[in-house]
Amino acid sequence: MAGRWNETSCNAPAADVANFRAAGPSSNQSPRKIQSIAQMSFSSNGVGGTSATPNTYVSPVAHFEPVQRFEPEVERIAKHIQSIWATWKQSKVLTDTLSCFFNSSPDPYTSLLQLINIISEDRLKGKATSMAHTITEEFYKWIKFNESEYEHVLTEELKIQAFKMVLEKKINLNTINTIVKIFKCNTRLDCMEELIRESIKQKRFKEACYASMSLNIQDRFTVEDFLLPLFFMNLVCVTEEFLVTTKFQQTALVKYLDDLLVENDDCLYFLANRLNVTQSNNNFSNKSQIKTNLTRIMKKYNIPNELAPNVTRQKKKGALVYLFRRYQSGATGIHAWREMALESIGNDETMMLEVVKMLEHFGDIQECIYFAQLFAIDPSLLPPTIQQELLFCENASAGIDLSIPTEEYNTTEYHDLSLPDKQIHIIDCATKFNEFLDKINIELFDAHLDVFGLDCEWKPELTSDKSDLASIQLATIDSIYIFHLPQLQPAESFKLHWQEFSMNIFSNINILKLGFEWKGDASMIRSSLPIDNIQLHGPGFIDIKLLWKELETKWNFQLPFQSPNEDITYNSLSDLVKLCFGRPLNKTEQFSNWEKIPLRSNQIKYAALDAYCLLEVYNLFKTKCETSNIPFDEVCQKISNNDHPDMMKPKPKHKKHKYKVPKTNIKSKSPHTHVSCVKHFKLLVPYTLEKLAERLRKCGIDTSIVERSRINDSHYIVNLIKTNNLHFIAFGHAFSKVAEKLHTGQCYCVQNHNLDDQVQEVLNFFKIVVKKEDLNSRCQICNSDSYEIVSSLVMKQIYDSVKIIENQRAVRYNTPFDEDYEDDNFYGDEDDSDEGTTAPINAKCLTNNSSLPEEPHSKLMSGYTNGNSMIDVKPLSADMFNDQNRVFYICNSCGSVRWDNLQWESALGSSLGMKFK
Ligand SMILES: [Zn+2]
């Protein structure tokens, strides 16, 4: 050990050690330091250590081997520290010991270097790196308080020594960073750069890489200096650590690797030789691996395709070959093929020539000539066969037809759309979107609007560039809506439209949404629409593919055009349609440019049918199940519940966020500065937020509802708000129509889909404080705040008398002479407000009520409220009266009964936090 110490690059260790030993008793050291040294020498001699060392630990002296020969002091300290480390790791005792050591040294900087030299040599014991790290950190903390005292010892020579050590020892990056800070190596950048270059020559690429990072001079080096060698050496994690710190080097590397792709095949061999690395069997040894690495780096650091023209071209060529093969086999139409070819070639002249050559290679002379002429390629560059062909055409003055041949949608070969074209609506502007929302708002709960077919389209991804969602198709039984997103821009101005769409359709569990392989569409919608928290799974959603599989495998389900032992893969909607209706879907537009404005009529038809056929299939399934006694609804429910949210986690967002707008902070902004009690607010909500209204009433807040027939009449709504001094709550487009005519504090746009969250939002926005006595103070059904509170005992009597009345009526109306059809509605509909005008059966109660105030419930006992509404006991059951302490609230206006719902109260209480007393 001692010998090795002297061989290290640090100079004059012997002198330092001598100084260190001599420092204690003599000269100008402070008493504190003298004490420290005494401790150190004392304990290291193995005598009386316990008493002298800090009182928090048992001295590790006991673990020491007896000192048998002379060792330099630093080495002895190093051993001592190693021993502390072995027992205590990073600890107060280690901190104290190190401070003692540094305090006692006349040149603590040199001492630190010596210490780390010894520690980092000692690799056999492991942990050397973390120990070196801890020691360095401790020193850094220590020197911060003592810096001025030792300024003079931090010489330029020492800085260089420290940096040399960084380049020679295997030290981790964090430690290096600290050492560089301690020794202020950044004050001599040029000199340090020289040292790094020196170590590159000695093949210390990793050290050079880290050193350049610690000085933040990454960009002084070229890709060849250490980055490529590290790739050759398979040290990918080091290159990642490096690249993440410098955009400049990311770009440089991408350009370099991209250029390599078009070099000849043995370029890598020569490169490795030139860079002084031995090329082994690694993941950087052939061009396809270079391509893989390049693609990965581009993806990771979002490097645009323009910076790597070669790899981008190669990918596009691959994709074009695929598209061409589809076109050749008839799976893609000629429009779709040409459109996508043009889209991916763009202005790239190299690519133009290559595509023409590719087409010649595949023997499609017609397409070859089409593109050659379209791109006006110099004939001398073309393959000889094509040159001749062109010459022939010219000689025959036949000319070449550049127009795209018309494509007939073959209705005999493929399944066709049964709706007329006028039922297909392209939603491509705000006006049409508004019309759609207005229509949906009214028809939403109509019986015929309970199942939707949903499908999405986006442009095929030819390179690593992610496509954005281009179209959402929504099919009802009599209309199809195609939302063409490239035309619904900028996304931000459609935020409220999408919010309303999402709340009314996606989040509405009363509407069944059908998809096929829905997960892919759902994640595309999630990452593309400018709204958060879209509900796209669970109740209300059915993946037809899963339903199909379930019916086939569990219920022995046979489709009309299915042969008995047919092997089914369940992967293709087209196959499913064929098995259902005899003909497959025409998929020739599937791989087309869905971002094209406007869409072609064939694209529109394809898109419409893709969504509509889901409804057709669903209806066929339903009918077949009914005739085969399969419990269709149960199966559907199972499918939709199994569609577990965990499987639907949004995938990482697309890099471009073209349709994504930043989160708004509407939620946190409230123009209301003071908190108010429940009584101060009268709210108005559209009927689409009926459930929210019920909750708010439960909190005691006066909440009226805009009925369905007036929902689109913003003039009426605004008038209502102004004359009655109401506050308005809505969402989406319906909100914005009204909000623009009101002042900011007067209306609130609901952000959340979840009911509890909505209540929260509203209370927060209007700063309404709900107290315990407010709960249940208003009728959920009719919004009246006039009610009677009765005990269990009284409620039981009311319950019994209502039952008797009902029985009497049943007897009366079931008598054979009752022929009045209209009267049948009478007892079936307790909520009817007209009922209050009917004379109560027990008229005596009226007088009882007014003349005997000590019996306030006698009117109620008769089964009627003070407002003469029959008390609705339907939600009650006899066993509820067993709880003597239960309290019931009877609405005087509509006769509905509510009771304390402790669970809900406590949930509300805790979620309202401070606001709830
Ligand atoms: Zn009521």
Image (tube, helix red, strand yellow):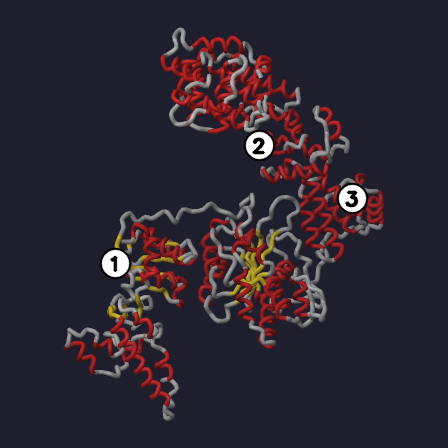
Q: Is residue 882 above or below residue 745?
A: below
- The residue that appears at 53% across and 63% down in the rendered structure is 640
Residue occupied by mark 3 = 357
Residue occupied by mark 1 = 679
x and y, in percent, of residue 549 in the image = 62, 64
x and y, in percent, of residue 532 in the image = 47, 51
Q: Quadrant of the N terminus?
A: top right
* Residue type of the residue flagged with mark 2: Glu
Q: Are marks 1 and 3 in contact (CB under 8 Å)?
A: no
Q: CA distance from mark 1 to mark 3?
A: 79 Å
Q: Which mark is residue 241?
A: 2
Q: Is residue 155 left or right of residue 36?
A: right
x and y, in percent, of residue 424 in the image = 57, 63
**Earlier sequence position, callout 1 versus callout 3:** 3
Disc 2 within 8 angstroms of ligand 1 (CB): no
Q: Is residue 639 left or right of residue 53?
A: right
**Label 1 element class:** helix
**Earlier sequence position, callout 3 versus callout 2:** 2
Tell me the mark number nearer the camera, choosing from 2 and 1. 2
